[in-house]
Image: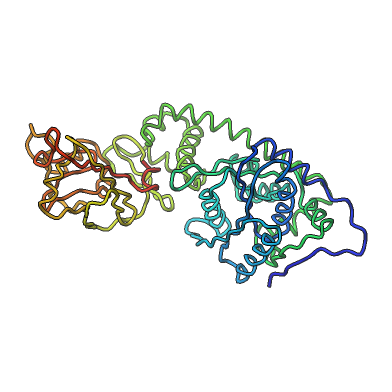
């Protein structure tokens, strides 16, 4: 069971390391007066020290802050830790919130999945900065673990002092700020003892069956006997890797300017590059969509399949919850979820939420444009997915044609055709995204109309 600890000593405590001064240097670089900060508080010694330091700096720097506990629901004691964190904040008069998350480990380990879910919560906070208590030992552990997993330059790069977060809603997200990266774990421990702070001791941190704990308790103590400055040395190596990775990103951006168009990667441009540069461009393309990057072997296999496939082939490559699909000479990134047919009745709402990841249909009022509102009053209006055989006449000067032919003519990828919503009045197809309104339902000049606008789901928008 996890224990709550309070540092006690009969000896006079040593002077605490100047954590506030070190953190203040970083905070002054980024944080402005009036900014809102949210501290990721776990109840462990690192985040408890960070809570104490922020309280000292709050008034001098003029920021406001609150604390956030994220319950990963992995430990049976997680609710007790939430109560402990709530008590700490209550005593100090700090706003506190606890959020429970569900971890999806498909395609990733527990630690990686928990981090992804945690950062998703961080990105949704109403704040200017998320503060974490990562330190020098975390940098060293992460670097060694990444190297042992065969990571490339990006994986071996240092945790940055500041990092942009992206919100699933597309709204502005706070930035992640790490003001303690130049301090070691022992500095936190000395500070906590000197200030007589209380914290939670999670016994799972001593379980060396976990890779990070094994490195922390078995590997680095031996390394330190021979190389006492290993923390700073490994952090410096990580910064070198980060600089080299940034150069590769700049090269990928140069290639992307020519090779990536409308969210798709041109296969001819990819295949003209030599293997290492093609891998780099493909890695950039996938990383920009937020995917967990595949191994170098997988990247090479994707490029090989692109070189060997023809434009009329049905190339489809699985990447966890995503698929790479070939269409019209380009690679398209598409969510891998399968959609079932659906019918949703429209009752005049301005926004119609569509089921199963299909997004939202926004119905805008207009005059002399869109669908004639009076025609929609004659029969029930529904939103459906394709079932085959639909016909539409968006151009009054041309004959009615099959929806399939219109979609092919407009070069709509097959997987998008299955997802797009179609508006029916009774059994007549009235409107299709990107194709327009059927001639018989178009408005006359000055007549009230409805203009549908399809907003695809976040995952689909990122893919497209």
262, 267: nearer the viewer: 262
Q: Is residue 68 visible?
A: yes
279, 33: nearer the viewer: 33
User: At which x and y percent is residue 93?
Assistant: 68, 57
Task: Determine which quarter of the picture holds residue 407.
Answer: top left
Task: Determine which quarter of the picture holds residue 326.
Answer: top left
446, 108: nearer the viewer: 446
User: At which x and y percent is residue 264?
Assistant: 37, 36
User: At which x and y percent is residue 144?
Assistant: 68, 49
Please say if 18 is above or below 6: above
State left or right for residue 109 relative to residue 373. right
Query: Going 67% across and 40% down the picture, which residue do you hit?
Result: 238
Task: Determine which quarter of the picture holds residue 269.
Answer: top left
Q: Quadrant of the N terminus?
A: bottom right
User: At which x and y percent is residue 259?
Assistant: 40, 30
Q: Is residue 317 visible?
A: no
């Amino acid at each position: 069971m996890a224990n709550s600890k309070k540092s006690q000593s009969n000896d006079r405590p040593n002077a605490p390391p100047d954590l506030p001064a070190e953190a203040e240097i970083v905070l002054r670089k980024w944080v402005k007066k009036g900014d809102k900060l949210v501290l990721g508080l776990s109840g462990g010694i690192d985040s408890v020290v960070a809570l104490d330091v922020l309280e000292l700096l709050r008034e001098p720097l003029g920021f406001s802050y609150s604390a956030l506990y994220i319950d990963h629901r992995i430990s049976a004691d997680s609710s007790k830790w939430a109560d402990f964190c709530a008590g700490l904040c209550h005593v100090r008069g700090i706003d506190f919130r606890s959020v429970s998350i569900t971890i999806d480990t498909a395609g990733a380990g527990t630690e990686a999945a928990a981090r992804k879910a945690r950062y998703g919560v961080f990105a949704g906070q109403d704040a200017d900065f998320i503060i974490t208590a990562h330190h020098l030992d975390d940098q060293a552990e992460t670097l060694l673990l990444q190297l042992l997993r065969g990571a490339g330059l990006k994986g071996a790069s240092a945790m940055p002092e500041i990092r942009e977060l992206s919100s699933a809603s597309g709204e502005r997200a706070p930035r992640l700020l790490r003001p303690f990266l130049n301090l070691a774990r022992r500095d936190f421990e000395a500070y906590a003892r000197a200030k007589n702070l209380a914290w939670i001791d999670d016994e799972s941190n001593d379980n060396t069956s976990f890779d990070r704990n094994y490195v922390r308790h078995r590997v680095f103590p031996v390394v330190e006997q021979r190389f006492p400055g290993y923390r700073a040395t490994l952090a410096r190596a990580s910064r070198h890797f980060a600089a080299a990775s940034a150069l590769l990103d700049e090269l990928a951006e140069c290639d992307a300017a020519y090779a990536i168009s409308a969210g798709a990667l041109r296969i001819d441009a990819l295949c003209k590059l030599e293997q290492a540069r093609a891998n780099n461009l493909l890695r950039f393309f996938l990383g920009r969509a937020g995917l967990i990057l595949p191994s170098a072997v997988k990247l090479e296999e994707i490029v090989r399949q692109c070189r060997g496939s023809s434009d009329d082939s049905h190339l489809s490559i699985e990447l966890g919850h995503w698929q790479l699909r070939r269409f019209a000479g380009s690679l398209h990134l598409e969510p891998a979820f399968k959609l079932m047919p659906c019918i949703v009745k429209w009752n005049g709402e301005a926004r119609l939420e569509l089921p199963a990841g299909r997004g939202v249909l926004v119905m805008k009022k207009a005059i002399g444009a869109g669908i004639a509102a009076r025609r929609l009053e004659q029969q029930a209006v529904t939103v459906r997915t394709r079932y085959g055989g639909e016909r539409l006449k968006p151009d009054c000067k041309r004959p009615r044609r099959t929806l399939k032919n219109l979609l092919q003519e407009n070069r709509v990828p097959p997987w998008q055709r299955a997802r797009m919503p179609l508006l029916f009045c009774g059994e007549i197809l009235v409107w299709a995204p990107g194709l327009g309104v059927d001639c018989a339902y178009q408005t006359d000049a000055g007549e009230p109309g409805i203009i549908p606008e399809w907003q695809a789901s976040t995952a689909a928008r990122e893919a497209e």
